[in-house]
Amino acid sequence: MSTAGRAAPAHLGALYPFLYAQPAATVDAFTAELVVSTKGKLREAALLRAQVLTEQGEALAACARELAVALDTGGRLFAFGNGGSATDAQACADLFAAPPDGYGAPPLAAYALSADVAVLSALANDVGVEAVFARQVAAHARPGDVAVGFSTSGNSPNLVAAFDRARRCGMVTVGFSGGGGGRLAEPGAVDHLFVVRSPSVHRIQEAQTTACHVLWELTVAELGVVGADSRPRAAQGVFADDRNTGAACADR
């Protein structure tokens, strides 16, 4: 029996009146359209992920080799992004810092600059939104660290500013962008750029998540598991292995 043919439970009827107030045929057509749409989006997402990995596989491997060297010699990874990309940055940092079971991967020093609300709001209020990541890079980073930025357009001013600061600091810079790459695709903007060529923000972020996971897998494959127990785990908002050398970056 279709949804429209049943009596609506009070709580569901209030939440979804459009389902229970329509004739059964209308609801069934709506459900069928929803299934077709979902399947189409899943196919699109799978094809886009495969395209990104096929076209940029060698570039991901080259980036992973450089990240492995940086992280194996005391470098730390700082990830950042805005909105949905902030959650992608947090997921990236968590993946490197607290890898899932079964991979035999070492935990690496990795932090999300978008995770500390107090720092973000203070910088946004006192200095300006464009400085929320660059100021943190200047304060905490040192040469040999890694900066990873996520954007669906590649045009976010605070990402561009952060990468500019990271380059002057001597960090390895890695960008994930969408569409045509935006300002991050300009010569010299970042060392490694991975562009998901799609107009859909949703598909871009899905493919970026996959590309980042592959980058992590390639990086830990380069590292192996040697020294896994000695590597620090990241704590949100805590930079426990700082050596108070960030001022050098602020002056560059």
Image (cartoon, grey):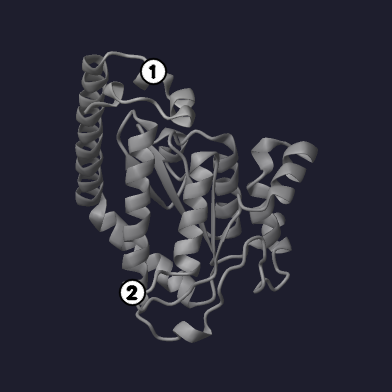
Residue type at tag 2: Tyr
* Observer able to see residue 230: yes
* Observer able to see residue 252: no
SS class, disc 2: loop
Which residue is the extreme one toward the right? Answer: 126
**Going 58% across and 35% down the picture, which residue do you hit?**
157
Q: Is residue 138 above or below residue 179?
A: below
Q: Which residue is mark 1?
A: 18
SS class, disc 1: helix
Side of 92 where 30 appears, left or right: left
Q: Is residue 156 above or below residue 241?
A: above
User: Considering the image in quadrants, where does the N terminus appear?
Assistant: top left
**How many numbered dots are placed on residues in this image?**
2
Cα gap from disc 1 to disc 2, whole angstroms: 46 Å
Q: Is residue 249 above or below residue 38?
A: below
Q: Is residue 205 above or below residue 66?
A: above
Instruction: State the image quarter where residue 17 is shown.
Output: top left
Q: What percent of the width, then of the height, locates residue 196?
A: 32, 40
Side of 73 where 143 appears, left or right: right
- Given residues 102 and 178, the one toward you in this image is 102
- Mark 1 Cα shell of 10 Å, populated few (<14), some (14-19), many (≥20): few
User: Considering the image in quadrants, where does the C terminus appear?
Assistant: bottom right
Disc number lying in front (1 or 2): 1
User: Residue 103 bears which disc, if any?
Assistant: 2
Circle nearer the N terminus (1, 2):
1
Residue type at tag 1: Phe
Instruction: State the image quarter where residue 124 is shown.
Output: top right
**Going 42% across and 66% down the picture, which residue do you hit?**
67
User: Residue 206 bears which disc, if any?
Assistant: none
